[in-house]
Image: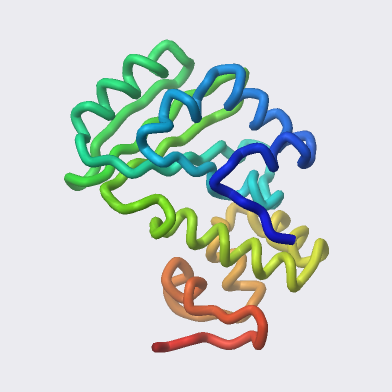
Amino acid sequence: MTINFRNIDYLNSGNEVQKKAYRLLMDYQIINRLEDYSPIVVGTIPIQIDVDGSDIDIILRVDDFDALEEKLSLNFSQHAHFRLQRAAGHVIVCSFSIEEQLFEIYATDKATEIQNGYLHMLKEHEIIQLRGKEFAEQVRQLKRSGVKTEPAFCQLLGIEGDAYTELLKYNPADNSINYE
């Protein structure tokens, strides 16, 4: 099943966690407030491998980091657990909670469609589509035991090396790694 992850409407017809995510994103106008930054909701919730405590991850593309920091503070600092930091020059990470749901916004100067958060989610979605619900549940079990998402996929698929780079090289159709 192909999903347009750039449009959050799919969340409204998903499972209960996805429907809650959609409601929060709409009720609090989070995507609307960030629309100038090409927002995409990524991570585990869109592909239904979230566990209790999973956050709603949103990636952004930004040119003016100072303006974005100001906008994030203005729009989200009133929410619980608000935190805003600029990491290593060209990255902003902002987190906050609404109705006990944690949000994390990650912004960099790369287009959202080529950021690793988006590319990992697409690859993981493709793998789940081929491997099925049992595989997705195995990923969730590993996540519940403390394993991060990409390493969980690699562990189940027998992929060695750095999970964050090797997973992107994985070809789910023939269970191979592309070392171009």
Residue appearing at x 61%, y 18% in the figure: 27
| Percent of width and height locating residue 100 | 61, 22
Residue at x 70%, y 55% (from the top left corner):
140
- Residue at image position (22%, 27%) is 67
Q: Is residue 127 above or below residue 119?
A: below
| Res. 26 in view | yes
User: Picture quarter containing residue 149?
Assistant: bottom right
Quadrant of the image containing the C terminus: bottom left
Q: Is residue 177 above or below residue 99?
A: below
Lateral position of residue 72 relative to residue 87, left or right: right
Looking at the image, residue 44 sits to the left or right of residue 162; the answer is right
Q: Is residue 128 above or below residue 100?
A: below
Q: Position of residue 49 (x, y in %)?
A: 69, 52
Q: 31 left or right of 1?
A: left
> Given the current orientation, which residue lies at the most extreme top position?
78
User: In front: 61, or 170?
Assistant: 61
Left or right: 42 in relation to 61? right
